[in-house]
Image (tube, rainbow, N blue to C red):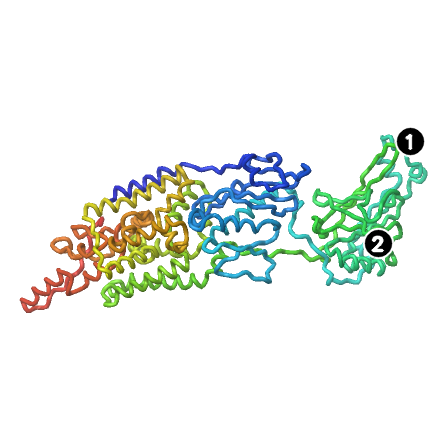
């Protein structure tokens, strides 16, 4: 047996250098995921990022898979890989599943619920804070968060998928949208009020000014064919060509300082139908005039442009009759509007670009243009920033959603560890021990298994191994704190007792097998008891199963989840037998066999049990007391041990011990322990009190 354990450990260590790589989709593969009328454009990098084109062939967004950008490991250790199609405004067009190894969806619930989960992303902005609903905590309807419906029994898996999607999308946006999409823009604070005059605006830098003389505009065209095309500029070089004032008049205090009330009323009425528009007042006291003779009102100005963050701002004439407030410089006044939803942030710096135009020639004149720029920024105090609520980390959200379950589980596990530790001998000798044990196992099956979904699986250690090999994150463990707490108790049990705490007390499917055994005894079914030789042979199968699964992690990881179906846990506990008939038949077979063969799956085939036996090598002591007579001449404990965990020598094989405490009860029972019975008889014949027998520990190395 020890040689088998060493073999598994050598296999674990020997395969560590192997690596797995994430593969990006080819153009043909990606095309199948891009919905019409979009088409796939060129590849933009070696991470599988493609440009998406609209029906006219113009760039419309990006398509990419999440794995190269956010390889967050799932519960099987492999990332959930999905295709995301993102438009140029940061809105998700579609999310399509490519590949995953999440055990609950591989063959438990099927992929249908997983694919339906991804359908919720269409039309949602990647800058909107999102959170996943769970069956353990409802969504707050008053929250600003966007709530996505989770999948019952698979909350941890969909959280991992969601984090992958958002992390990858934000990475692509930062690298390729180049600031076109930003966090929600500031909006005017209409409750903020100040008594300001035009002089205050100038003094506080709330209005920007650009002055260009005729001489300066002449110098801008110097050396070109248009150098002599403006006689007025040459005649009066010191006169202003452009004397431009710029102020954002959307905030009420700024509007009152710059505009007459009649113009403010026009803005208020317009805001009723366009609440996201920002209004910019331009006043030119020079001769430029702001617009050309061909300008059509209520359209984009032909001589004025703006940009912010290197990207254009869509400007449009507001078509207002502009009357200025007293004290405001007179000139050509124009109010332009832009929609904040199109990317303009009024609290951030932006640049106004004004074209100076000259013509050369008469019949077919050549047009020359020079751009004049004016930088502007309005003080932050006039705006409110839409700071989205920061969702709590997924692991913390999972803790909060299940805090009641976790408190109950922690209390129960603490009581069980105390009872099996400090009170073990008294518990084993209690006349109600058997019904008490069955009650504990019923709680483990109902609360930990069916309700809490805390059935541990070999999939988790394999996922940890895969993350270690590939240098991935172990954060996926935090998405299921309930199971993580059971794992913590099992690991503590390794040190105190070996594998027995989990396999004998905490495993829901193991509890079902024990109930099946009691049912078989109640029905008086004949019991199968393999010989000692066959018992040893059959017990080695679980180590072979574990070694095979470990090998698949490195050699064929895509098949690990299917191979892990050797465990019937998912069928019986996770999905409550609601799956394909052959999986149900397989799980029922082991439960039916348990009626005549005591815990056959646990003893002979369970790869998780083999892993627990490896963990049991951490055991720091031989906690089952032995006497020198154990094994020679007394064999009562060995005969009574249904697990076959006691050798002929009386030595306890802790790698097979399920901590049922039967031998502990016999050891302390004056009427059943043969050495105690014989000692009492000898004392009766001599008329003296029987000597106190001190339990002897096992030999070292037991």
Report whether 396 appears left or right of 187: left
Report whether 422 appears left or right of 632: right
In the image, 489 versus 398, the foreground residue is 398
Please give the residue where the numbered disc 1 appears in the rendered image: 363
In the image, 626 versus 577, the foreground residue is 577
**Quick one: SS at disc 2?**
loop
Please give the residue where the numbered disc 2 appears in the rendered image: 320
Report whether 169 appears left or right of 111: right
Residue found at x 48% / y 54%: 155
Horizontal and vertical percent for residue 83? 55, 42
Which picture quadrant has residue 432? bottom left
Horizontal and vertical percent for residue 267? 80, 57
Report whether 465 appears left or right of 377: left
Residue found at x 33% / y 47%: 607
Using a 10 Å C-alpha cutoff, classify the residue at mark 2 as few (fewer than 14 neighbours), some (14 to 19) or many (20 or more): some
Residue found at x 87% / y 45%: 289
């Amino acid at each position: 047996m020890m040689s088998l354990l060493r073999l598994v450990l050598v296999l674990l260590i020997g395969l560590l250098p192997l690596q797995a790589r994430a593969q990006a989709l080819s153009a043909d593969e990606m095309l199948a995921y891009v919905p019409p009328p979009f088409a796939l454009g060129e590849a933009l990098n070696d991470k599988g990022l493609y440009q998406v084109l609209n029906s006219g062939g113009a760039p419309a967004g990006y398509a990419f898979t999440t794995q190269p950008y956010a390889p967050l490991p799932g519960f099987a250790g492999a990332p959930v890989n999905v295709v995301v199609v993102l438009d140029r405004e940061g809105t998700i067009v579609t999310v399509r599943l490519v590949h995953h190894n999440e055990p609950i969806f591989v063959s438990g619930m099927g992929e249908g619920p997983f694919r339906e989960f991804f359908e919720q992303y269409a039309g949602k902005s990647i800058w909107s804070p999102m959170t996943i609903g769970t069956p353990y905590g409802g969504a707050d309807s008053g929250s600003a968060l966007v709530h996505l419906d989770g999948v019952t029994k698979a909350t941890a898996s969909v959280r991992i998928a969601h984090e992958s999607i958002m992390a990858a999308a934000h990475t692509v946006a930062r690298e390729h949208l180049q600031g076109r999409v930003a966090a929600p823009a500031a909006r005017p604070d209409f409750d903020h009020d100040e008594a300001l005059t035009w002089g205050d605006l100038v003094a506080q830098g709330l209005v920007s000014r650009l002055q260009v003389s005729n001489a300066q505009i002449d110098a801008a065209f110097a050396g070109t064919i248009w150098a002599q095309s403006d006689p007025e500029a040459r005649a009066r070089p010191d006169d202003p060509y452009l004397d431009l004032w710029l102020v954002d008049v959307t905030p009420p205090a700024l509007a009152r300082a710059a505009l007459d009330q009649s113009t403010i009323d026009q803005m208020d009425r317009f805001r009723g139908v366009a609440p996201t528009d920002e209004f910019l007042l331009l006043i030119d006291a020079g001769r430029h005039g702001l617009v050309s003779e061909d300008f059509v009102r209520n359209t984009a100005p032909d001589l004025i442009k703006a940009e912010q963050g290197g990207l254009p701002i869509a400007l449009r004439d507001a078509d207002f009759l502009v009357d200025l407030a007293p004290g405001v410089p007179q000139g050509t006044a124009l109010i332009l509007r832009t929609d904040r939803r199109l990317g303009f942030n009024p609290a951030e710096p932006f640049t106004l670009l004004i074209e100076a135009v000259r013509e050369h020639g008469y019949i077919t004149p050549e047009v020359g243009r020079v751009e004049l720029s004016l930088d502007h920024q309005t003080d932050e105090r006039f705006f409110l920033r839409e700071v989205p609520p920061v969702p709590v980390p997924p692991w913390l959200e999972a803790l909060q959603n299940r805090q009641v379950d976790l408190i109950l589980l922690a209390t129960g596990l603490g009581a069980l560890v105390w009872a099996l530790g400090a009170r073990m001998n008294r518990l084993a000798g209690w006349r109600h021990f058997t019904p008490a044990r069955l009650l504990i196992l019923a709680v483990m099956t109902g609360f930990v298994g069916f309700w809490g979904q805390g059935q541990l699986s070999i999939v988790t250690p394999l996922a940890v191994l895969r993350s270690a090999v590939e240098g991935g994150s172990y954060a996926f463990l935090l998405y299921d704190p309930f199971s993580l707490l059971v794992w913590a108790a099992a690991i503590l049990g390794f040190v105190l007792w070996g594998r027995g705490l989990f396999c004998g007390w905490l495993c829901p499917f193991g509890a079902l097998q024990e109930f099946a055994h009691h049912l078989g005894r109640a029905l008086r079914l004949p019991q199968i008891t393999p010989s000692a030789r066959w018992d040893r042979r059959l017990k080695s199968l679980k180590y072979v199963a574990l070694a095979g699964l470990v090998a698949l992690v490195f050699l064929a990881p895509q098949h690990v989840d299917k191979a892990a179906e050797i465990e019937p846990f998912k069928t019986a506990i996770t999905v409550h037998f609601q799956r394909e008939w052959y999986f149900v038949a397989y799980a029922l077979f082991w439960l039916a066999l348990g009626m005549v063969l005591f815990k056959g799956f646990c003893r002979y085939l369970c790869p998780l049990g083999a892993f627990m036996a490896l963990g049991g090598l951490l055991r720091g002591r031989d906690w089952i007391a032995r006497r020198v007579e154990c094994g020679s001449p007394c064999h009562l404990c060995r005969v009574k041990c249904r697990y076959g965990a006691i050798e002929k020598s009386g030595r306890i094989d802790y790698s097979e011990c399920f901590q049922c405490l039967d031998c502990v009860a016999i050891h302390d029972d004056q009427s059943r322990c043969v050495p105690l019975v014989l000692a009492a008889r000898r004392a009766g014949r001599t008329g003296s009190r029987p000597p106190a027998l001190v339990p002897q520990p096992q030999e070292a190395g037991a």
